[in-house]
Structures are given as C-alpha cells and as structure tokens.
Amino acid sequence: MAEIKGFLKYKRKKTSYRPIEQRIIDFKEVELALTPDDIIQQAARCIDCGIPFCHGLGCPLGNNIPEFNDMIYKGQWQKACQLLHSTNNFPEITARICPAPCETACTLAINDEPVFIRQIEFQIVERGFENGWIKPVIAKQKTGKKVAVIGSGPAGLAAAQQLVRAGHGVVIFEKDEKIGGLLRYGIPDFKLEKNVIDRRLAQLAAEGVEFQTGVEVGKDISAHYLKKMFDCICLAMGAGEPRDLAITGRGYENVVFATDYLTQQNKICNGETIAGKIISAKDKSVVVIGGGDTGSDCVGTARRQGAKKIYQLEILPKPPNIRPEDTPWPMWPRIMRTSSSHQEGCERLWGVKTTKLSGAETNVSELRGCSVEWIKTPKGWNIKEIENTEFTIKTDLVILAMGFLHVKYEGLVQSLKLKLDENGNIAANNFQSSVPDVFAAGDSMLGASLVVKAIDTGRKAADRIDKWLMDNK
Ligand SMILES: Cc1cc2nc3c(=O)[nH]c(=O)nc-3n(C[C@H](O)[C@H](O)[C@H](O)COP(=O)(O)OP(=O)(O)OC[C@H]3O[C@@H](n4cnc5c(N)ncnc54)[C@H](O)[C@@H]3O)c2cc1C
C-alpha cells in the first residue's frame, strides 16, 4: 500500500489546461501534466483496497493499478513502467485520451474523488520514454508463420505488436497514407499530437512489424490473395460506417460527416495534401449534431478554425451532475461531462431533434428542430416530439457526429462472406470469425467503442491467433 491514510491527507489534484485564449489559436495538446511531487501524492491516495475494482472491473486491459501506484510512491518508476507495459501496449495513448473507467470504478469514488490513475499512467510512460526504458522487444525465436493485419488503428497495432513479439511475421495493411487509424485521422491533435504515435511506431518497426500504407484490402489487393500469402488474417478495420440523418435537406454540400471534417484538419496539421474541397468553419455559424466525444472534437476543431458561433445538439436528455441510480458504483456513470472543447465556447442543447435543413441552391442556411421527450415502453424507448418547442438556427455548416453503425461491408467483409452479429459487426467466437483463418479485433467486431477496448481486443485476438497458428503447424 502506498501510504496508510494517504487518501485522508491528500485531495485529488486536477490537471490544468493551457489558457483558452492561447490554446484556441493552435492545435497543440491542451492538458498540462502534474509535477512529479504531485504525482507521488496522487499515488499515495490509493487505498490498496482488497478487491481493486479499478483493475478488475474498470480497466478493460486489467492494468495492475494498485501495484504501480505503490511503486510510484516508492520511487520505483522503471519497475512501474515495465508493469504498465505488461498489460497495455500504448499507455501514452490511453493516458491522454481514455475516459478512464478505472477511475469511476475506484473504491475511493464511492464517497470521495477517485485516484487520478490516468495522470499517473501518463507520468510513468512519459518518464519511460525520456529515460530510454521503452525499447524494442525482439522475439527470441521466429516461427516462420505470417499474419496479415488489416487496419492500423489501436486494435491492429496492438495485435501486430503482440504477434511479432511471439515470433510471427506481421504485415499491417492500411488504406490511408499514414498509420494510426482514428488515432491519427479522427482524434484531433489538441487531444493527441501525432508525434506520440510516431514514437511508438518506431518501436513496432524495430520489432519487425512491416507497414504497407495506401493499400485498401478488398480493392487494391484481394482477400483471396492475402489468404494465399499469409497463414491467417486479423481484421482491425474499425467501424467506419457513420450514422446518417435521413431528413429533408441532408444533401446540401455544407452538411458533412464529422470524420470527413476531422480527417481534413488532422491532415492539415500533419502537412498532408487534401483531396477535394476544404471544409472550414472560419467565420461560420456551425451546428454539430451529436453530443458525444466526436461531436466535442468537432466543437474544438471549429473553434480553432475561427467559427463565429458553435452549437452542439444532443437528442438525449441532459444527464445529471451526480451519479444516477441506474449506473451505481463501480459502473461507468451516465453523468454530465464538460470537455476542454466545451469550455472553449459552444452552446449545448439537450433533448432536441433536428427535423429539417433548408437553404438555397447547394448550401444549407437554416436548421429546424424541436424538443423531444423519451418515453419508456415495454419494447424500449420511444421519442415523442413536444408540441410548440420548434426552433430554428441560422447556420453555414452542419456537422453530423451521431456515431457509427458498423464496419464497412463493401470489399473485404463481402468478399470473405463473413457472418455478422445482430448489431452488424463482424461476428466472432473468441476473436475467430466465421472463416477459420480470419480473426477480428477492435471496433470492427465490437462496434464503435474506445481505444482501451481496441487495444484489449487486439491483444486478445493476437493471443488467440498465436495459439491457433501453433496448433495448426
Ligand atoms: C473523432 C473521434 C474521437 C474519438 N475520441 C476518443 C477518445 O477520446 N478516447 C477513446 O478511448 N476513444 C475515442 N474514439 C474511439 C476510438 O478512436 C476507436 O474506438 C478506436 O480507434 C478503434 O480502433 P480500431 O483499431 O478498431 O479502428 P480504427 O482506429 O478505426 O482503425 C481502423 C483502420 O483500418 C483501416 N481500414 C479499414 N478498412 C481497410 C481496408 N479494407 N484495407 C486497409 N485498411 C483498412 C482504416 O483506414 C483505419 O486506419 C474516438 C473516435 C472518433 C471518431
């Protein structure tokens, strides 16, 4: 245990953010790190409870949180770095962008603020890179087996790293120009700067992972060819089919999907060329439809592009400020969350539905909507429009950030004739798809989820593939 009664002595310390007026004129990361002294005190707050829900129930990766808290308190940083990497391939990513379900499951969170686990993880991994403790792990023996990983998001990268370390030959095929999936092209730099990804990719390359970018499997090369060239395939293509809005006016040119919008800005930040028209929020009244993380990332991006006014609309009711009864501890609570992007300025509307978009020629200029009521029925929830609540918003750019449906089917999923589950994701039994030498991980089998779950399923799929390959010698 870090420090007996440390939790009574020290309060949870919040990280601070760069001042708003400074940060909205660039795309650099906004969160500031705590000092090493602060971190030791934060680690000292861990009560080493008998059953660490943070580790067992909260963290999908099963990070050994009480143990590394204790190590930090004792100054054993290198040991903590090793321990963290034993369960998490990319702690520098989760330390920046994970919503930290470990913290909402922390025992202290029952009646106090949880241990600041995410920031402790950040300090461990950053110190690891600074001190050169994070080195390539080269497999002692090669198996002669070859695996093709399709998609280079966190799931594909975690699977590839685990497989190459087990001695298999691994090639990642990625349709985009650069490696990283949504880490690179979805999540904005102000949450995750891309040199953080590149630093880790150097480790993967040194370990022997081969990267083939600009190759769309199912279009540029066939799945049939890959099956011949490799012993098996791991699909980690994400859930790239965005949820659309079937209303009048959807077809206007300035009604765009969030991923198209965010990808463009990420490419601009990274000096890549943009194909097609640039979507900019400069001097515009922007409406983001969708109140989740993707929507919040659009808000922050529009702010930095110089939007005149930003609205974010959410169809669900405003969540409560404190943990509601339907998500008790240690569950992930449905509570009001305000991101750094929201703090930069945006008007949030809750319990509203967009009913119509109108404009002239090719451009939308007005959004119409109304408030809705959620009614519970034996068959589930129904949405009812509330009379006399209609409103209009003048707008020059509407961004659709309403989540994702499932993996894209055309090309690979169709040509492999893969079975789908009831939600339209790739059906998998212990990560093995309906085609025996094809495995799946990440959002392509989970549906749109979180980075931490993508890493977790990538690791587990790799484990399954390794056993399957070695049993099928
Ligand atoms: C805007 C946005 C913000 C987010 N913010 C957060 C956050 O703050 N915290 C968090 O935990 N999660 C966040 N998420 C969710 C998180 O990014 C995803 O859950 C995670 O990236 C899924 O990983 P993945 O590896 O399964 O797929 P992806 O990251 O989607 O990667 C899939 C890759 O496969 C490639 N691909 C697809 N088909 C083919 C093909 N046929 N051939 C070759 N390549 C192919 C794609 O180009 C892509 O690079 C966010 C998502 C979005 C969209």
Image: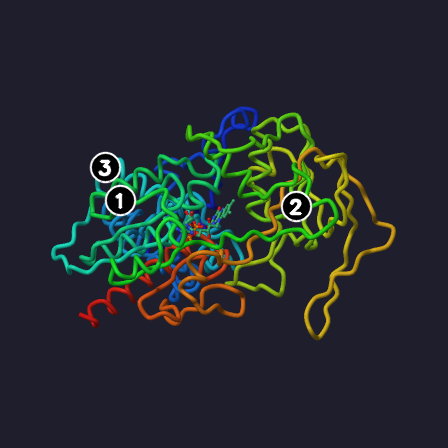
State which tag comes first along the sequence, 3 or 2. Answer: 3
Q: Residues within 10 Å of mark 3 (few under 14, many from 20)?
A: few
Residue 38 position within the rendered picture, expressed as x and y whole percent measured from the top left: 39, 39
**Relative to 36, is 418 on the left or the right?**
right
Dividing the picture into quarters, in which one does residue 339 lie?
A: top right
Q: Which residue is mark 1?
A: 75
What residue type is disc 2 on? Ile
How crowded pointer 1 is (Cα within 10 Å; few <14, some 14-19, many 20+) is rated as: few
Please state which of the two labelled residues, at mark 1 or mark 3, is closer to the viewer: 3
* Real-space CA distance between mark 1 and mark 3, rounded to the nearest whole angstrom: 14 Å
Asked where in the image residue 97 lies, by quadrant, the reply is: top left
* Tag 3 near tag 2, CB within 8 Å: no
Query: Taking 285 as reference, is 142 above or below it?
Result: below
Q: Is ligand 1 less than 8 Å from the beta carbon at label 3?
A: no
Crowding around mark 2 (Cα neighbors within 10 Å: few <14, some 14 to 19, many 20+) is: many
Position of residue 400 in the picture relative to residue 384 (left or right): left
Which circle's residue, 1 or 3, is located before the other in the chain? 1
**Residue 285: x and y, percent?**
69, 32
Q: Residue furthest left?
A: 141
Please tell me the numbered disc located at residue 289. 2
Q: Which corner quadrant holds the N terminus? A: bottom left
Q: Amino acid at mark 3?
A: Asn
**Who is closer to the viewer here, 461 or 277?**
277
Nearer the observer, disc 3 or disc 2?
Answer: 2
Q: CA distance from mark 2 to mark 1?
A: 47 Å
Q: Residue at x 12, y 57 (%)?
A: 141
**Residue on which disc 3 sits:** 131
